[in-house]
Image: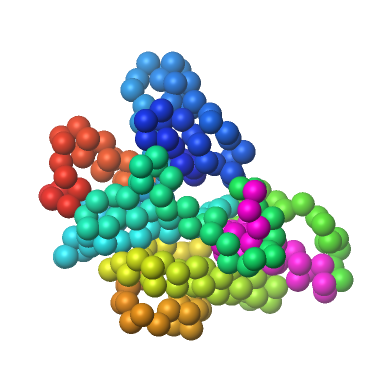
Amino acid sequence: MSLPGRVDLFSQRFVFAPNLAWKHADLKQQLEAATGMKVHLENEANACALSELFYGGHKSRAGNLVALAVSEGIGVGMVLNGQLVRGPSGLAGEFGHVTLREQGLPCACGNKGCWEMYASNTAALRYYYARKSSSHSKIRPGTSLPGPGEFEKLLHLAETGDPDATAALEEMSRQLGAGIAMLVTGLAPEVIVVVGEITRAWERVEPLILNAIRERSFTHAQARLIARGPAHLPRLLGVSALVMKERFDLPFAGFQ
C-alpha cells in the first residue's frame, strides 16, 4: 500500500505524515488484522519513482530519476544509481519540508516556509481564495480551505479562462519550479517525473516550471521533465513493482 507519509523501515510504523496528522500509527498491524494478509507500506513518492523506473519505458533504464508527487502536500522519491533511496530509517526524500522562505507560513510538520506550503494543490487553492478576497468577492479572509476535490474545480476554472484560477495555477507552477531547481542542482537526475492532478494542465504549467528552473539552476545539469497523470496509475504500478522485486529478489537496476 502506498500512502502520503514516511514509514520506519524496521517497525513499518508511520513516523512522518503531517498531512494525515498521524503520529507513529501502526497501520500495518491494523490492516493485517483486518484482512488476514501480509501488508507492506510504502511512501507514495517512492512508489511513483519505482513505477517510472520499471514501467517508464526509458531506453537507458533511467537509473537516476526523481519522482515528485504533488497533491495536498509534496513528496519526493529518488532512484539513484538504479536503487531506491530510503535512507537508514526510511525518511530520505522529504524535500517538501525543506524551507524555501525563512519567515514563511507555518507548516503542519512544525517548520515554517516549507516548499509544499507554496507549491502544493492546497497552496494553489490558497492563492485562489486570496485573490477572490482581495477582489471584494463574497469569500471572506480566513475562509477555511476546501477539500482535495476542489483542486479539480480550480483546474476546470483555469481551463475556462477564470483569471483568479489561472493566476493561482501559474503561481503554484513557479513555486514548483523553484523547488525542482533545488533537485536538479543537488541530485542532477536524468529524469524528473511529476505526478498528480497538476499534470492535467501540463501544456499551461510546464513552460512556467521550466523557466523557474532555468532562473535558479546553473550547474548545467540536464534533467528531463515529464508528466504522469492519474491515467498512468504510478502509485499502483510502483507498489506492484516493489512486490515483484521482493517476491522474486530482483535487483532494481537489473529488472527486466
- Which residue is more in the foreground, 177 or 163? 177
Residue 60 picture quarter: bottom left
Give the image location of residue 16, x and y in percent: 52, 41
Closer-to-camera residue (229/213): 213
What is the x, y in percent for residue 30?
A: 48, 21
Above or below residue 141? Residue 254 is: above
Q: In which quarter of the image is the N terminus?
A: top left
Residue 161 seen in render: yes
Q: Is residue 96 left or right of 184 when viewed as pictured?
A: right
Is 184 situated above or below 34?
below
Q: Which residue is drawn at 49% across and 44% down?
A: 4
Q: Residue at x 46, y 64 (%)?
A: 199
* Nearer-the-camera pick, 103 or 77: 103
Residue 57 appears in view: no
In the image, taking residue 41 as reference, residue 149 lies left or right, namely right
- The answer to whether 217 is drawn above or below residue 107 in the figure is below
* Percent coordinates x, y for residue 205 in the rendering: 50, 74
Q: Is the magenta stretch mostly helix, strand or loop?
A: helix
Q: Where is residue 170 shown, x and y percent of the image?
A: 59, 74
The range drawn in magenta is: 110-135
Q: Does the magenta stretch include residue 33?
A: no
Does the magenta segment cover residue 114? yes
Residue at 48% in and 83% down: 215
